[in-house]
Every structure is written in structure tokens, then in C-alpha cells.
Amino acid sequence: MLLPAMAFAQSGTNSPYSQFGLGLLSDPSTGFNRGMAGVALGMHESNQINYQNPASYAYTDSLTFIFDVGAAFQVTNFKEGTRKLNANNSNFEYATMAFRVAPNFGMSVGIMPFSNIGYDYFTSNKVSEGSTTYYSTSYNGTGGSRVMYVGAGWSPLKNLSIGANIGYLWGSYSRNVINAYSDENANTIGRYYSAEFNSYKLDIGIQYTQKLGGKNSVTLGATFSPGHTLGGSADLNEVSTSTNISDTTKYSHDKAIAIPTTLGVGLAWYHGKKIRLGADYSFQKWDGCKFPDLTSKGYVVTTDAYKNRHKVTLGGEFVADATSRKYLKRVHFRAGASYATPHLKVNGHDGPKEIAATIGLGLPISNSWNNRSLLNISAQWAQNNATGLIRENTFRINIGITFNERWFQKWKVE
């Protein structure tokens, strides 16, 4: 559990858009969901962990202990006008486990990402036409946030399950903006932003499954997560330097950061154990969430740094025969796509919207002592784009390993 916490210190992005708000939102899905672009709210599997809807824990196999870890590797192309730049990143993403506690009652424990910050760039221009003095501004920042959680799912009635994740959300960031002139005698102004924040995070889920006859069934899922203000402080140190004389002005605000209320609904169709198709819609009420910012009124806590976010996800999976002796028939083939509206504001304008498409495989791991584990691999293309601003095209490889072992099997002697 400590390993992924330390790995989160490594930034998994180089996006300039991560300098706004809490940064870019991370994908909270595990390996099998990611192959379907993250569709999850109506999904429940006996041998996979679905963190996004805790009601799914109720369906965990009674003989199984599941441990799931994942990492991501990506290449991003940034384009602004005629200028292009590529950047590579890798990051340890998540670690979760799940197990059955009692009939119709399952639990999960793990650590998941929430947001990510990482960027480093600068601009440089002449002070005036014909001048030999340049004015430059450098921007750099790192940080992010994550959730360590304990969750439970229970099925009190046939076909109905409810569940909840209760987690500890914490994070920090460091952002620097430095204005300087090529003339050594000119003033240099540096603004150093930092914050540490923490609080609880609660996710509530419900699922209802309706048999349609034959091998067909549909599951309707819904989730709710209340928004609230986080604890901790946000600080700004403004340093003005001139001819080796430095003057520092300090600002600080407590409880200046908030997370949004989130609602989600999803529908999944199952055809036996061969086909799974799902569709999700989620709404995050970022509008009105608090965040500290430097404005014409000074360093103040604002409520207009964000806008509401809507996301639609479609995805599915096909496996010919999960119990076949032939390897290819046991391979899971997955695909999905998603679209999300902006939740960030960039200088008062809409930030980037996101379009993504994913394909994936679930490869069975078979040896003399285990034939239930899966290697989940997916390839994703994602584009972040805002009118008149930088366009980002990212190719990402997600790798997850689901260790699925029989820990609770009772032996009988005749």
C-alpha cells in the first residue's frame, strides 16, 4: 500500500492545462474498465474490482481474493499554431484489493488517483520593437491528489445491491510563475504558490439487475458523491528582487479548496458471460467550488475557477468462452469511447474538452497453480482541445494485473 503512495509523487502529465485548479482529473477506473474507456456504473463482476460503483462489491466471488495494480505509459503531442512538441510520461496508477466477507457482502480496500499536476514551460518576448532586452515568464508546477479508501457492498434483496466507499483524500501542489528581464539590473518578480489539503471522500452506489429471459439481463447503476470544502491551507509568496535586494509579501488562506458533488448513472447489458455492453453518464458540479487565485483584488478565494462537467462513456467486452481449454477463446476483447465537457476555466474562458477512444485485451494468466488471473492491457487515444489554445493528443498504454486466487476454498474428505 505504501508503494503506490510514494509513486504518486512522480508526475504523470506534462500538460500546461494542469496549472489550473486542482489540475487534470485522473481516471478512477481499474484495468478491465479502462479497456472499455472507463464504463463502470452498471458493471459488476465476480472476478474484477469496480471501484466506481461500490455496490458491485456484493458480487465478489466467495472463494476469491482479488488484488489489482495498474500503471500507465503515455506520449503526448502538444500543438500551438505551427509549433509542436512531444513529451513522455509514466506513472503508477492504482492498487486495490477485494474479498467476500459474508454471503452477499463484499469489501474492497485500495488507493486511487484523483487529480494530477505537472508542467514546465516559458515564454520570451522583446520589451519593445528594436529593443535588445527580453522579458520572459517561466511556469512550472508539480503535485496531485489521491484517495485511500475502504468500501463495502451488500445485496439485501435478490438482484439489488448497495454499497459505499469511505476514503481519505489528500494532496498538495507547488506552482511557480517567475517574471524576469534579460537586463540584470531590472526587477524580477516570482510568485510561488503552494497548498496542502485533505479531507474525507464518500461515494455511495446502488445497482439493480433485471433478467430479460434466456441469457440476457440488464443492470441499472447509480452513484452519488457529496461535494465539500477540504481542510488545509493555500499560500502565495510574492518575491520582488532588484539589485540583490529582495522583498517578500506573503498571503495565506485556510480551507480554500473544494471538491464537487458528483452524480452518475449507468446501464449495462449482459448476454451470459460472452458479451457486456455499457453506457455511463456523470455530472460533476464544479461551478461554485472554492479555489484560491490571484486577481485584481489580490490573492483571494474565488468560486469561478471551474464550470460544471458532463461526461458520457460507451464501452463493451466480448469473450468467446471464459471456461474453454483454448487460450484465444478465453481472451477478453474490449473497446470504448468517451466525451467530457471542460471543468476548468483558462483566463476566464472554457478550458479543454476531452475526447477519447480505447481498445483493450484481458489476457488470462495460466500456470500450474493459477488460471484465474488476468493481464489487462489497453491502448487509448485522447485529445484535450480548447478553442484558440493548445491542442493535446495523447497515446496512452494502460497495464493492469488482476491477481485472482482461491483463498477461501474448503477441502472435504470423503
Image (cartoon, helix red, strand yellow):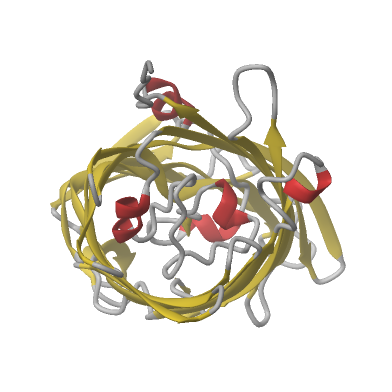
Q: Is residue 184 visible?
A: no
- The quarter holding residue 394 reads bottom right
Q: Residue at x 65, y 56 (%)?
A: 35
In front of the other: 297 or 367: 367
Q: Nearer the viewer, residue 5 or 301?
A: 5
Q: Residue at x 74, y 48 (%)?
A: 331
Residue at 47% of width from left, 54% of height from top? Answer: 45
Left or right: 350 as drawn, with respect to 256: right
Q: Residue furthest toward the right?
A: 82
| Residue occupying the point 25% across, 52% down | 104
Query: In the rendered image, which quarter contains the C terminus?
Result: top left
Quarter placement of the N terminus:
top left
Question: Could you say which is closer to the camera, residue 12 or residue 246?
Answer: 12
Please determine whether, in this image, residue 262 is positioned above or below residue 65. below
Which of 85 and 214 lies nearest the eye of the viewer?
214
Residue 14 visible in image: yes
| Left or right of 87 on screen, residue 90 | left
Q: Where residue 20 appears, x then y in whole percent?
A: 44, 61
Q: Quadrant of residue 336?
A: bottom right
Location of residue 243 with respect to 2 vertically, above or below? below
- Residue 408 location (% of width, % of height): 35, 26
Residue 275 in which image quadrant: bottom right
Left or right of residue 374, residue 74 in this image: right
